[in-house]
Amino acid sequence: MLAQKHCGIKQQHRGSLRKLVPGRNPARNNFTFGGAQSARRLGLEDSASFSQWVSGQSSTAIFRPVACASAAADSAPSVDPGVLIIHYVRKDHNYKGWGLHVWGDSTRCTQWQQPLKPTRVTDRELVWELPLRAGARRVGALVHKGEQKAASGEVVISAHGSTMSVDQATGTAVQEAWLVGSEQSAFPFPPDMSRIPAGSINKQAAHWVSPGLLLWRQAAADGEAPRRFRLHYSRAGHMHITGAGVQGADASWDLDPQPPAAASPGVKRFPHLYGCTALAVPPEAGAAAGAAEGGIVAGQLLVSVHDAAGDALDATGVQIQGLLDELLTYDGPLGDHPDPSGGGHRITLWAPTAQKVELLHWGAAPRGGQPQVYPMARGAAGSWSLARPAGWLWSYYTYRVTVYCPWTARVETVESTDPYSRGLAADGARTQIVDLEHPDTMPGGWHAHAPPALAQWTDISVYELHVRDFSMTDAAVPPPLRGKYLAFVPERVAAGGGGGGGGGLSAGLAHLAALRAAGLNHLHLLPTYDFATVPERAEDQRVVQEDLTRHPPDSPQQQAAVLAVADNDGFNWGYDPVHYGVPEGSYATDPDGIARIREFREMVQSLHGQGWRVVQDVVYNHTFASGPHSRYSVLDKVVPGYYHRRHEDGGICDSTCCNNTATEHAMCERLVVDDITHWARNYKVDGFRFDIMGHLMMTTMAKIRTGLDALTPDKDHGVIGRSVYVYGEAWDFGEVAGNQRGRNAAQMNLAGSGLGAFNDRLRDGAMGGGPFAPPQFQGLVTGLALAPNPAAAQAGQGGPDAARAELLVLSDWARSALAGNLRAYPLHLCDGSTRPGEQVLAHGLPLAYGGLPCEHVAFIGCHDNKTQFDQILEKASVNESSEERMRMAAMCLALITLSQGVPFIHAGDDLLRSKSLDRDSYNSGDWFNRIDWTGATNGFGSGLPVSTKNGGSWSYMGPLLREAGRLTPSAEQMRTATALFQAMLRVRYSSPLFRLAATADVIRQLAFHNTGPDQNPGVIVMELTSAPAPGDPSHGVYDPKHERLVTVFNCAPYANDVPYPPNAARLQLHADLAAVGDSRLAGATADEGSRTLRVPSRTAAVFVQARQ
């Protein structure tokens, strides 16, 4: 998606406060106050007005007191409040940048990203005036600055029990409440600040970035009066904060404020800390941090600030990621590994903040039993290790770690698997000791076999497929292999009694064989590492029991049945990582032990033998869980707070969906780099698609590339690391946007890196709108201006003139994509100007951002959002027939396939696959995700999609689904769609000019006609010209068969005549297109006499000038 990625999680396990989102009312400590006694118990002053309390002086009030306590209110007139006044007070008077998130019964409720600015600001408080709805009962308020949360609470609205006044000018009853510091409840009266804790142990807003430097966003002085800062430590985690400051420390050190320039080294590494006060840490504290026995990093750390008079102002916990990177980065082997010094084997864990680590050895039992406990020895740079006997091979272990946890503010003892696991028990419950070089872990001939050769990255084309989708509903696959790795192995399918899809293959294998024969060459598999959200043992998986085919096409019954089992069935996309380095167990015939390893390898080897290179979808931007309690939390149990990216106040960032990881931290980066090279070397994976790649740093991606390039056939069993392609979602959003955490792998940073990135401009130009626009918005392919959908105009896309103007703009977007999304490519635009792509805007950013053709991943549909067919259903005019919708789908596939760069196709889009309009089917079960490889059905009309993600759209989806009989494509139309796609693949691979690798060659050899303000709308004409002779790179790439190829994309609902390009001659329809036998495509002709190309409606045609 463009700006936000929803990952397929069934639940979120988090160790920190959840981010509030619009419409979510957080549960807080809600109080209904009961008069003076309760006020005194809570330390409240019930006899003073707020202005007297805050200034110590009397003042003229603009409100007439009505009630100061419920006792007084009993005798006062009962008036329903019309306004709630929220006061926010801090001891440190740090009021810059705070806003208010409001929910409940106010007329000024907010979206999270748009907090209310204060109504009034003074040096003593912030004030918000919130109008109330009639009959208001509760209002919630949370003070925040971006993702940094401060005080919050819910206020009970009542004429009794709280501070009440009447605005004398309007007669409106006014209720007041106070939010203080970081307290998580609202006060009905001005509180006694001496009894309010001066800070919070549950936040970590101070940052120890290097041994001698700590950064905290606190003023160094009050005017001319300097503040005093202290660092405090408790090994047992017994510190707490009172109104007087930090209590219970084992040791404390003074911190000296420094000039702003002193913060530069820390800010350079952590840009989001710009503007923080630099505090010099004394050498003795720095030395204590790196002490051999764990030092003070193994305990609770707090920093406090007092004013010149000694009054406590604030205190907070300390983030130590930067300090750990400087003092305790470990470069030795991790997990189970050969002992480099004494022979034999060792098990090593990096846990620099742990106070104690034990290994629990479970023997051969994947579950149950009692472990033998072995203490692990502390080693260099935060490591712990244990020599293990050779006889432990294939046995299971876990760690027991005693460590201070910032999420609970105490020392916890937790049990965890190994972050460097290479084998697992079912559900990732225990780490298994494995030997990946042992014959039992690999099929015969594993080391000797080599992947299909690849000359250059622009020769790649990608088919994105989910392992379970591939075979779960394929009747030609033996039941034990359905949804498994082995369903990709023809010999296994045949041995199990399957076949029948052609040539003894399953239907899925037969379809893949046809695609491969046409030229498609990379199979992208959705996540196949160990993920959390599917029970791995079949006996633990729930299934839908009823026959869902008996319900009408617009019925809610199908989705109700699917949702009833969704959290415990066998389906999930898998974007919920737990163990990055082990294959997922639910796809293996036995989830315990090494079957998952051997069968994954057998799948890869078989796909290589079928001519496919294999891409793995990897999700290093987040983990499924964090904190000390979830069984799916691994990294955060071992080194709490280190592996995850955190907000400035310490909470874990969750912009990706949950528990964002932080590859700007050295050991997190190392984990990712180690893991990628592990998959490439040990599993011969040929490419990696990075989920939300923009949340990883460019330094990390560069190290990944270096690690892959170091893999060579001689030393790495035939792996050519330089051929491994890396691409991903380079969206720029959340806490990393605009390089806030360093230079991230986002679109605007990628040029020249060789990293591929999905191009949303082609998607949105062809389809119209985008993921966050109304679904009826139209684009180049779906009928914008030329076959208008009235619903698009009603949704705000504009009238005829606006639609035509937008169509010309979106046509320019498509041309930029066809030219490889290159920043330097000159485009003759619809406004009459000629500018390079980087100087044209799309979505408020440069239209083109790539530096090399291989950096362009051309796509329109993928697993995210609706399928290509479903989008066309929503966007095309309701009057369009199923035949015309099929033609639109074929046009989308042609635009992708004939683009410079790397074409990317979602599995089944060539068969007009539908998910019954489901926009996010990550947890929608086999029913909505199924693929019929025979082309008999496409899935449309399977019922209303799941309400959890689509319920708000049922009102317009229902009428479409009710017309399933008219809108569902016929089997013949599905066959035609995939035949056209396969023909376009043959065209792509018939000429090197569709796969240019150099930017200069694209600029030199690719040209567009029918451009500018006077163009024939809906028609794109692309000309590719061969170099005149081979062997001279200065003239570009030589095509031995063709002097010229002219492609016409006629997206209009009528035929168009197109003039020959100036130097073209002897043009003929490409032989692979002529051979399709499609009656409409056969109408694409070249008239040499009139020098005219005639192209039927909604048809892409390639004409060739054969070499003489």
Image: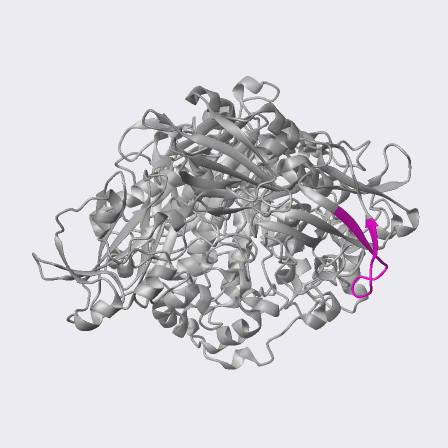
Residue 615 versus residue 76: which sits nearer the camera?
76
In the image, residue 1014 sits, relative to residue 268, either above or below, namely: below
Evaluate whether residue 284 shows in this view. yes
Q: Compare residues 13 and 1041 and report the one nearer the observer.
A: 13
Magenta residue check for 360: yes
Q: Nearer the viewer, residue 327 or 500?
A: 327
> Depth check: 754 or 242 in front?
242
Q: Residue at x 69, y 33 (%)?
A: 708
Question: How is the model colour-coded?
Answer: one colour
* Residue 777 relative to residue 1078: left or right: left
Question: How many numbered marks does the figure carry?
Answer: 0
Where in the figure is residue 611, as x and y percent of width and height?
Answer: 71, 46
Horizontal and vertical percent for residue 316? 48, 41
Quarter of the figure that contains the C terminus? top right
Q: Is residue 262 above or below residue 867?
A: above
Tell me the quarter of the picture where residue 711 sits: top right
Give coordinates of residue 917: x percent, y percent.
44, 64
| Residue 164 on the magenta span | no
Horizontal and vertical percent position of residue 738:
42, 34
Q: State left or right for residue 458 relative to residue 893.
A: right
Q: Quadrant of residue 547?
A: bottom right
Where does the magenta region start and end? 357-374
Visible residue check, residue 1050 = no
Q: Is residue 1009 above or below residue 32?
A: above
